[in-house]
Image (spheres, helix red, strand yellow):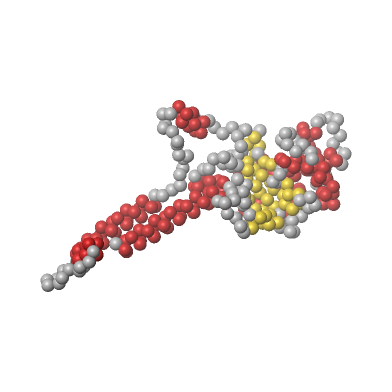
């Protein structure tokens, strides 16, 4: 305060800020010192923000030396993935568009992923069936997918209803007589593929009700309608879509992996989708519908949530620092 000026009178808090703080800040040297201090603090804070990343391991609920925690660590880290372990099913679908997101609220209704939108021009004709079967065989035998798609009995693990439907059609047509080999062994052998196995469009409505009541030869504990519940797009009158599912070698439906790892796997499956659309576009041409890729267990949904959480945390922190800096 200049000589002769009386201090501001009032409550103690007002007196402190108006008489002490204001006088301190009004000094240009003091302002420069404060600027340097807050600039250093802001720099350190921004640096720490850049180190934010999603959790990469499941948080332990017990100490490392606890017997139960030791057992959990051994099961999670020491045992390799077995052929019988379930992998995440990645679905490649023809005849479907991106879902309608209207009304989706996963917090209030976690089972509502939106309403499906169908490609009205989708046509499950004989050429479409031929091209889809070629995709199934490529998933099984293409060595480029060895690390991406789980291997069972030396081939890629897929769910391909086209095969069982084609074999069943030949059975109904009298091609399979049941004398030399049992039906499921005949289906799995693939020898029937040398016959005219494609179901004519005019006969699908007749064949499909019988086919859905058959037991699956791939999983003999389930009926066709249950085993291919999400892959077979029969609505009772028409084939609305067709899905080929592959089993991931590195992701599973039970454990959530870090966003960076899941994103790497996701991008590889997207590359396959692009290849099916670009170099193998004849599937889309034959079926008159492009291919989309997704999973049905929300693993990829949570992957995107992790990315949003990180981005939001960084943006919020930067905004908070900026506001605090200018206020102070």
Please state, as top left, top right, bottom left or bottom right, where the N terminus lies in the image.
bottom left
Percent of width and height locating residue 157: 65, 39
Quarter occupied by residue 100: bottom right
Query: Which residue of the protein is positioned furthest toward the right in this rendering?
Result: 174
Q: Does residue 284 appear in the picture of this structure? A: no
Query: Which residue of the protein is positioned furthest toward the front in this rendering?
Result: 11
Quarter occupied by residue 222: top right
What residue do we see at 12% from left, 72% from top? 4
Q: Does residue 171 appear in the picture of this structure? A: yes
Percent of width and height locating residue 37: 25, 57
The foreground one among 117 and 282 is: 117
What residue do we see at 32% from left, 61% from top? 325
Quarter occupied by residue 177: top right
Q: Is residue 100 left or right of residue 178?
A: left
Please state, as top left, top right, bottom left or bottom right, where the C terminus lies in the image.
bottom left
What residue do we see at 86% from left, 30% from top? 179
Query: Which residue of the protein is positioned furthest toward the bottom in this rendering?
Result: 4
Percent of width and height locating residue 87: 60, 39
Q: Is residue 32 left or right of residue 69?
A: left
Report the number of numbered marks.
Answer: 0
Q: Is residue 223 left or right of residue 78?
A: right
What residue do we see at 28% from left, 58% from top? 38
Q: Is residue 158 above or below residue 1?
A: above
The foreground one among 310 and 288 is: 310
Query: Which residue of the protein is positioned furthest toward the left in this rendering?
Result: 3
Percent of width and height locating residue 218: 72, 36
């Amino acid at each position: 305060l200049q000589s002769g000026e009386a201090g501001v009178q009032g409550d103690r808090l007002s007196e402190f800020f108006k008489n002490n703080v204001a006088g301190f800040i009004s000094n240009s040297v003091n302002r420069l010192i404060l600027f340097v201090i807050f600039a250093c603090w802001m720099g350190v804070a921004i640096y720490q923000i850049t180190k934010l990343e999603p959790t990469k391991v499941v948080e332990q609920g017990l100490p490392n030396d606890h017997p139960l925690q030791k057992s959990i660590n051994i099961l999670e880290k020491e045992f390799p993935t077995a052929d019988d372990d379930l992998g995440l099913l990645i679905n490649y679908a023809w005849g479907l568009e991106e879902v309608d997101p209207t009304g989706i609220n996963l917090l209030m209704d976690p089972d509502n992923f939106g309403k499906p939108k169908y490609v009205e021009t989708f046509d499950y004709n004989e050429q479409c069936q031929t091209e889809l079967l070629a995709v199934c065989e490529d998933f099984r035998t293409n060595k480029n997918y060895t690390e991406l798609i789980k291997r069972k009995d030396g081939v890629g693990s897929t769910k391909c209803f086209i095969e069982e439907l084609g074999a069943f059609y030949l059975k109904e047509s009298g091609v399979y007589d049941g004398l030399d080999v049992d039906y499921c062994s005949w289906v799995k052998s693939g020898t029937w593929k040398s016959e005219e196995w494609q179901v004519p469009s005019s006969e699908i409505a007749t064949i499909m009700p019988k086919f859905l009541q058959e037991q699956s030869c791939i999983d003999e504990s389930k009926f066709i309608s249950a085993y291919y519940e999400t892959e077979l797009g029969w609505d009772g009158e028409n084939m609305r879509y067709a899905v080929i599912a592959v089993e991931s070698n590195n992701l599973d439906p039970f454990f959530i992996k870090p966003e960076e790892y899941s994103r790497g796997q996701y991008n590889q499956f997207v590359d396959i989708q692009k290849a099916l659309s670009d170099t193998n576009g004849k599937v889309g041409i034959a079926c008159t519908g492009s291919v989309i890729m997704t999973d049905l267990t929300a693993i990829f949904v949570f992957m995107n949530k992790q990315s949003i959480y990180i981005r939001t945390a960084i943006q919020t922190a930067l905004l908070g620092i900026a506001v605090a800096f200018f206020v102070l």
